[in-house]
Image: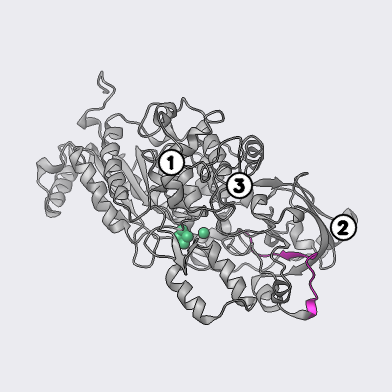
Amino acid sequence: MTREDGRISSEELRSHQWYGTDGLRSFSHRARTRQLGYLPEEHLGKPVIAILNTWSDINPCHVHLRDRAQAVKRGVWQAGGFPLEFPVSTLSETFQKPTPMLYRNMLAMETEELLRSYPVDGAVLLGGCDKSTPALLMGAASVDLPTVFVPAGPMLPGHWRNEVLGSGTDMWKYWDDKRAGLIGDCEMGELENGLARSPGHCMTMGTASTLTAAAEALGVTVPGASSIPAVDSGHDRMAAQSGLRIVELVWQQRNLSSILTAEAYEDAVATVLALGGSTNAVIHLIAMAGRSGVKLTLDDFDRIARTVPVLANLRPGGKYLMEDFHFAGGLPGFLAGLTDVLHLDRPTVSYDTLREQLDGALVHNSDVIRDRDNPLAEEGGVAVLRGNLCPDGAVIKHIAAEPELLRHTGPAVVFENYREMQHSINDPALALTPDHVLVLRNAGPKGGPGMPEYGMLPIPDYLLKQGVRDMVRLSDARMSGTSYGACVLHIAPESYVGGPLALVRTGDLITLDVEARLLHLDVPDEELARRRAAWTPPPTRYERGYGALYHDQITQADQGCDFAFLARQGEVPDPYAG
Ligand code: FES
Ligand code: MG
């Protein structure tokens, strides 16, 4: 029974079923906790806080999280909770092949089942490298315990010969310079040392920074958490604060669903768009919202994009890096400039209202975080396209493209898959011109598989040498949040399942018109019907294993690429029943 102050008693803790009853099971759980080395007075009657840690030796973005979990524990102990750390799957954007996107839903499943099956009253989730944030929050949303997210934090800015480097973004840039013959192996060796200088996730407004900012905008982090550099002492303090906070949320029974409302997701979309954030956020937020029972669609992104300008001057679309953003006021300062489009009366993990949370938030550098009358772009950073080539939609980050390409008609040159594209893109026999539209297929959720970040197709060497730095490119793939260019992405349905992208032939004219939100294949319907009749589906790649489950269950990009059996709403029995 909830007490008058709105807090529950220790007998109402979920973990009480494991620890507090008279039966043999409780006796066994207590005996085994003695085996772990804890005294009864250290944990009985206290909220059990699971700290889900995506730390790994192979994950440079999370390598500091082993230490950071200690700071979370410190906070939990001090608030009168009982912290227990759980290692969970690590999703390293750099190392995991073909792409960690193949495993986002696996981490989401692991998160959900682990929180459900153990004596957990509340959860602190540690992650940040690209897919980790959505994976952890998707799983946690499906269990709906009180939850706080601890973002891994951006790495320090890169440096090379007095230049500031952004991870990802400058890697592509200098790789193109090397291909164009402007720099050599010596410079590349120095760049190897300078691009990524410390633990932490990519410090551009790539996918990691976009999704951790979205988490903060949703209200599931403590205020200001998402931009603190990973190695700043403030990151330790933020982790401790998250530990302190989660215990209180358990006593108040403020479950994740009370934070992750439809209004919160709308605000996260507005935030991502005003940040000029990664296109990957479109897929992830749709999937996360789905787990919260909130219907978020591509059209919501396009609608909201028209109401918010881009205010963050961050690479790849702008100039600065995450550390600059942090010192300019971080997300609280940034959101303070968007209060007219935000839902200020919704709760966060720290405050009853977002309004209170943003009270006093200031911007300290108006070139990094722009005023409304001096935006980086008039409209949000992502446009949703429709047309006969993408009946279920496609997206383009138009602010990171050459403006003259945003309205373009040109002949297609089609690559059947990524390998073929890599093999032939530099072949002069293709005789590509800047007017050509590069088309890559079989790179979607099923076809990739895992929808790899192949969407920024390389410009052929011979065009690079002529100074060409952007072309219209189309695919059913994703693109790294640190990439740029006139790349139409997430074409749905994907070619592998017979979407119209499968029917394009080299030489067909394709029109991109971002202002009209149009992607059109200039081929008569009758001809497309003929091509469709002649099309045969490619063979299934996985005969067994996780890949086979993935293939059976993955939804298309416009649906968020969740597994169908995880995305649907429905009851799951309490594991302790019986
Ligand atoms: Fe981990 Fe970029 S590689 S965030
Ligand atoms: Mg990335």
Per the image, the residue denoted by label 3 is 559
**Viewer-closest of 16 and 292:** 292
Q: Residue at x 46, y 35 (%)?
A: 260
**Magenta stretch: dominant SS?**
loop
Whether residue 323 is situated above or below residue 252 in the rendered picture: below
Amino acid type of the residue that numbered disc 3 sits on in the rendered structure: Gln
Which residue, given by chain and number where applicable, does mark 2 sit on? Answer: 523
Q: Where residue 273 sits: x, y (%)?
A: 58, 43
Type of the residue with mark 1:
Gly
Residue 539 can be seen, yes or no: yes
Pick the quarter of the image with the C terminus. Answer: top left
Secondary structure found at label 1 = loop
Near mark 2 (Cα within 10 A), the count class, few <14, some 14-19 or many ≥20, is: some
* Residue 4: mark in rendering: none
User: Looking at the image, which is closer to me, 302 or 177?
Assistant: 177
Residue at figure coordinates x 80%, y 64% from the top left: 435
Q: CA distance from mark 1 to mark 3?
A: 34 Å
Task: Tell me the quarter of the picture where residue 525 sits.
Answer: bottom right
Whichever of callouts 1 and 3 sits on the residue coming sooner in the sequence is 1
Is residue 271 toward the left or the right of residue 73 in the image? right
First reached walking from the N terminus: tag 1 or tag 2 = 1
Compared with 446, 578 (above or below) is above
Q: Is residue 510 magenta?
A: no
Give the percent coordinates (x, y) of residue 80.
Answer: 18, 37
Q: Which residue, given by chain and number where applicable, does mark 1 sit on?
A: 329
Which residues, given as a range, are shown in magenta? Answer: 429-445
Q: CA distance from mark 1 to mark 2?
A: 51 Å
Q: Is residue 520 left or right of residue 78?
A: right
* Image colouring: one colour
